[in-house]
Amino acid sequence: MAAAIAIVAASRRLSSARPRFLKWNAPGFRRICSGGLGMISPQLPEPESGCSSGDESVTPGRKVLETFKEEFCVGSRTITLETGKIARFANGSVVINMDDTNVLSTVTSAKSDGSRDFLPLTVDYQEKQYAQGVIPTTFMRREGAPKERELLCGRLIDRPIRPLFPSGFYHEIQVMVNVLSSDGKHDPDVMAANATSAALMLSDIPWGGPVGVVRVGRIDGQFIFNPTMDELSASDLNLVYACTEDKTLMIDVQAREISEKDLEAALKLAHCEAIKYIEPQRKLAQKAGKQKKDYKLSLVMETTLAKIKSLAEEPIEAVFTDATYGKFERGEAMDKITKDVRAKLEQELDEESLKVLPKVVDMVRKQIVRKRVIEKGLRVDGRKLDEVRPLHCEAGTYPILHGSSIFSRGDTQVLCTVTIGAPGDAQRLDSLVGPPTKRFMLHYSFPPFCINEVGKRGGLNRREVGHGTLAEKALLAVLPPEDDFGYTVRVNSEVMSSDGSTSMATVCGGSMALMDAGIPVREHVAGLSVGLVSEVDPSTGMIRDYRLLTDILGLEDHLGDMDFKIAGTRNGVTAIQLDIKPAGIPLSVVCESLEAARVGRMKILDRMEEEISSPRTMDDGNAPRFATLKLDNDAIRRLLGPLGFQRKKIERETGARIAVSDGVVTIVAKNQLIMEKAQQKVDFLVGREIQVGGVYKGVICSIKEYGAFVEFNGGQQGLLHISELSHDPLSKVSDAVSIGQELSVMCIGQDVRGNIKLSLKATLPQRVSEKKTSEDSGSVNVMLDVDAARIGAEDKMSAHFVEYESEKLDDSSYSTPSFIIRSAADYGAQNSATSKLVTKKTARKSLPRPYNESPVQKGKLSSGRSNTGNSTAGVVASLRNKKPIVASLMRKKPNEEDRNTMFANGRMREGDEGLGNASVQKNQDDATIKPKTLGTATARVGSLKLGDRVTAKVYQIRAYGLVLELAGGVRGMYKFEVNGRKDFELGNELNVKCMSFSSKGIPVFSLPEDD
């Protein structure tokens, strides 16, 4: 005590002698040295030995974490196993490292007594987004339910470790795997399986490990071990192999038609690399492992087994040697046998035997079935060992679907359907490694009714996800490349009835459905399952005898040792999944199974090709339709609209699906009708090259007195003149169209200023004009129809006269002809007023702007002509006969007398459409006034009308026609007719007839037929 007091006093004197800044209590710092991690107080000097040891005294403020590591190489990768640093309370915990990827695996065991008849092993694999430095994009910004990839990785860990637990060990085991960090280069699944094996070795749980798991790829014929994700994408083989030192435990393969010979070589190389994981695990267990505990095992006593066997063996053998029994008949017979044995045991009051009765009855059944297979080579249903069950194939079951098929093998039946979608329908993957999307999906469904049971349908099921992924891998090898067929494909497999290997039936049915949908797959893919029944030496655990079974039943899967699912084409294997029940199978037996599977696969392919041997053509009305457009950014912006509104609107209105990616727009529709609707709407928003004569969908955006403006072809506008609205004359544009109305219009050309001219009547059926003369009324109606071809000819000539018009025409001296079209319906309200024309009052009718008010002269029906030459009697007669009235006037400054006598004075804007058709109706003293014949000196702009014959001189000769000169410097045009006269010379005088006027008011002439 005195010595201690002296030491404390000395330390206080030393502290008081130091400067103040040396007395500050600085925070502690961590030190890592040879596996030691601790907190060291700054006031104390570091020990000279930098390693933590068991006899080293732990000073205050220091936490020692004793860690153990094992480092080794597999292939070209360095791998590290570490324990003791984190998750120290778990029964066993290991962190495995490869480059910058770290995975933690922990193992725990429940404290229960294990009184059950199965092993409740649970493997939870989780990839959290922090491992790659990303915050989840979910609403809660947390990881949700397990994703498909996490379920698949959990199965990959479960399958190799489950067979190594001792028989009768039924305690609850939970394995939890977390990816701590990921560099995106390596897939953590294989690392997680090895870390789990090491964690089980460190725990006190009885287990027959360790195991080694390795991934093998092949690039350009060279096998590589533990390939990166980039190397794996270029590889034609993705093999995951798990084994002990001398036996195979699990195989999982995805390949591009690899041959059985190459696959056998890959398996042998994988075994040699996988065992490199085993010795480091043993060394780590020797350093930090726990002593194995004595757990209670649920075993059946020999006396109980013998007693129940004596009661049940004979009736069970009678049932399972009779091939006439079906799946459910055998089940009912087994229930009856169990019930009879239970009754006898209850009479004897044997409670111990009653507890294990179901388990022992199943053991007796297993012995009988396996013995019969080994000794006699006979199976439960009477087939030979290499015989495939009867097959039924049907393609195109439901024609309205994109693709459908039914495949039956024995009592196993699946219905497969195919749905094709746009590239945007691809599944988005939220995983640490691999591609961000998946364009081919196969969803496998195993409803309870397929085995005549009652059950609930929940979310993702591990079994359904695993079986669907296996079939997906098998079919993926024959799909066309994404550049050739970039659409999204979904295959649905609905199991209708199950009696063994529904996943391989899904492969066969899915292949036929893909061909039925017209997807250009290279060839068919088929699959079947190979089983194993073996006889093991109890002393050595080695297999003494075995039999391979082709196309196993569900019962043979349950009672056998192996379920080896192999799928492929005639050229090679595309997918494999091996699951076993014993603690390993020799690799030689596995390789022998490959040949048995190949023979059976060829038989199934022959039957499938009889039903459908090549992809169907997609010319059916119900077949899906696809269209791909390459657009610039502006066009895509118009197509999408704000927040994708326009695209969603098209999808909602048509039912088509539209996807946009890298300037490429993909349209997917269920049939041709929907595709046409979608393309029309896309063309309306985006636009396409405008061609004369092309028909386009448009919307009326505004209405003027001379026509309507139509928005079409991606926002472009064109003029739909009033004369192009209908074959019948119209007085108002609003009588035919309204704002917002959708209609189909034809492009008929451009005016002199480049404006697009549209026609609605060109898309309507042609109206046949009939000329009728009514002698009773004394009026004659003349309809001069100018067809679309003549209008197009005038427009071409007008384009050639642009220079002529700009230089020679003077708007003050040359007026554009205008016309007013009024129908009888417009005058319906004036019928009563017209009948009272005997009065001297003037009735006025307001016309639409910009037309001027046109007073109608009232007088007696027998009165003479008005100043304009049109009689009131003709007007009244036409109104009563419901016939249209057309007044064609030249634009000139009217005098006061003209204003009182004109029907209308319209005014055409510059660049507007010219006359499409005109009708002149005159009546004087019940006689018809015919067109005048004017000489050269009398032809004037104000007096020239449709049908007038004049004499003109050839002023210019153009490529498409002539420029004619009339009196007073008035010039017109004449277009060469097909197979008509073209031998004209300058100065020739011609007798021509006025047929129409161009958009600039230039008269268009033709040669009379009589000349």
Image: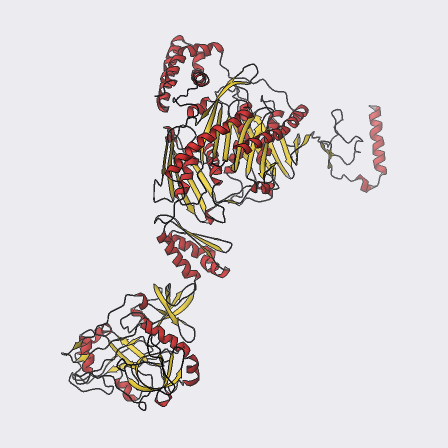
Q: Colour mode?
A: secondary structure
Q: Is residue 76 above or below residue 350?
A: below
* Near-viewer residue (827 or 947): 947
Q: The N terminus appears in which quarter of the rendering?
A: top right
Q: Is residue 324 above or below residue 309?
A: below
Name the outermost residue toward the top. Answer: 348
Residue 115 x %, y %: 49, 19
Residue 308 x %, y %: 43, 12
User: Quadrant of the rendered structure where residue 761 is?
Assistant: bottom left
Residue 676 x %, y %: 37, 55
* Near-viewer residue (913 or 808): 808
User: Quadrant of the rendered structure where residue 824 is?
Assistant: bottom left
Query: Is residue 739 found left or right of 874 in the rendered image?
Result: right
* Near-viewer residue (745 or 479): 479
User: Quadrant of the rendered structure where residue 832 is?
Assistant: bottom left
Query: Is residue 912 found left or right of 35 in the rendered image?
Result: left
Name the outermost residue toward the bottom. Answer: 937
* Near-viewer residue (214 or 197): 214
